[in-house]
Image: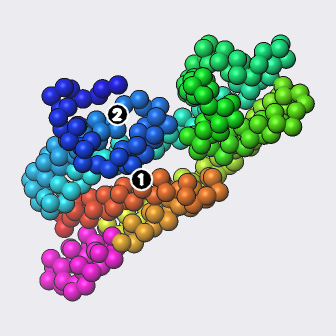
Amino acid sequence: MAIIPSALSPLSRTVDSIIPDRYLVSLQENLVRAGMYVKASELLTLVILGGIILGVIIFFLFSLIGITPILGGIIGFILPGAGIFLWLFFMMERRVDSIEQSTPDFLRQISSLLRSGVGIETAMEDISKHGRGPLTDELKRAVIEIKIGSTFEDALLSMSERLKSKNLDRTFKMILEGRRVGGSLSDVIETVAEDLRAVLALKRERKANVMMSVMFLIIAAIVAAPFALGMIMSYSTFIGKLGNPNPLFDSAVTAASGYIIIHSIIAGLLIGIVMYGSARKGIKYAILLAPAAFGIFYVIQSLAPMLFGF
């Protein structure tokens, strides 16, 4: 699916030739995992152009309001890429969650078809033809892989590997093990479906129970600390204008900026631990919170003197 006009195709080909293939392939896999069927080099082309345009706009805007224009240019250039990739990250998580929620019903359908005498590969193909949603897309891909020579086991495991879901990986491995040892596969799949449904219900309950803690961490990271330190820096500026400059003011601003960034990163990692039991899952929140917290701190520090007449 093309997302850029033909006039920008030469630029897209240039990006395609400059960036190493392994990075483009990795990005393309993540795009497919997020349900975005676009070419990676075209998306990067739009991100670069958007960054240049927004960087120029914010550069002149910062010049007009008296803030360091180079900083505005850097922020503007980074924003489109950061926004796109953060959105992509959340889309991947949302799609995986949607597939997990649909899997128990899919397994029950498979179990019913097996009881009627249909083979499991045929059952998968039949469901993929009549279903909708991200799980159906993954099933269609698995069915195609089987048709071109992959085994049922390889197709199912490659699906869980693409989605990077521990719940689905565990579920598919249980089904494959049940198929290997023999017995009633329909009963095995029915049991696995109920087990997965219970696991997902427990996961939703845990998320609901920790939302207050998560909100506290978010408010502390992007509101309380940046606002408080920004007002302190503004007050120090006011004192300096009265003839009592603080010789450590520049160092204090640097230290406050570093503290806010570190504090927001730690808060993001804690959110991952609280919600998912894994600090690695919190990296996406840390990436989002750190620039937001620093941006609020910088705005408060810069605009508070004008708002309060310091």
Instruction: Determine which quarter of the picture holds residue 291.
Output: bottom left
Q: Quarter of the image for the N terminus: give it.
A: top left
Q: Which residue is mark 1?
A: 288
Q: Horizontal and vertical percent for residue 122?
A: 70, 17
Q: Nearer the viewer, residue 19 or 145?
A: 145
The reply to whether the magenta stretch includes residue 78 is no
The stretch in magenta equals 231-257
Q: Horizontal and vertical percent for residue 279?
A: 57, 60
Q: For the residue labelled by badge 1, is the local secondary structure a helix, a strand or a loop?
A: helix
Q: For the residue labelled by badge 2, is the local secondary structure a helix, a strand or a loop?
A: loop
Q: Which residue is mark 2?
A: 39
Q: Horizontal and vertical percent for residue 143?
A: 61, 24
Asked whether residue 129 is in view, the answer is: yes
Dot 1 crowding, Cα within 10 Å, few <14, some 14–19, many 20+: some
Amino acid type of the residue tagged 1 in the rendering = Leu
Image point (22%, 50%), residue name: 77
Image point (81%, 33%), residue name: 179
Q: Is residue 292 left or right of residue 277?
A: left
Q: Is residue 3 left or right of residue 276?
A: left
Q: Nearer the viewer, residue 183 or 90?
A: 183
Q: Horizontal and vertical percent for residue 194?
A: 81, 33
Q: Is residue 162 left or right of residue 52?
A: right
Query: How many badges with numbers are in the image?
Result: 2
Q: CA distance from mark 1 to mark 2?
A: 25 Å
Residue, far front: 149
Image point (22%, 59%), residue name: 303
Whether residues under marks 1 and 2 lie with C-beta atoms below 8 angstroms apart, the answer is no
Amino acid type of the residue tagged 2 in the rendering = Lys
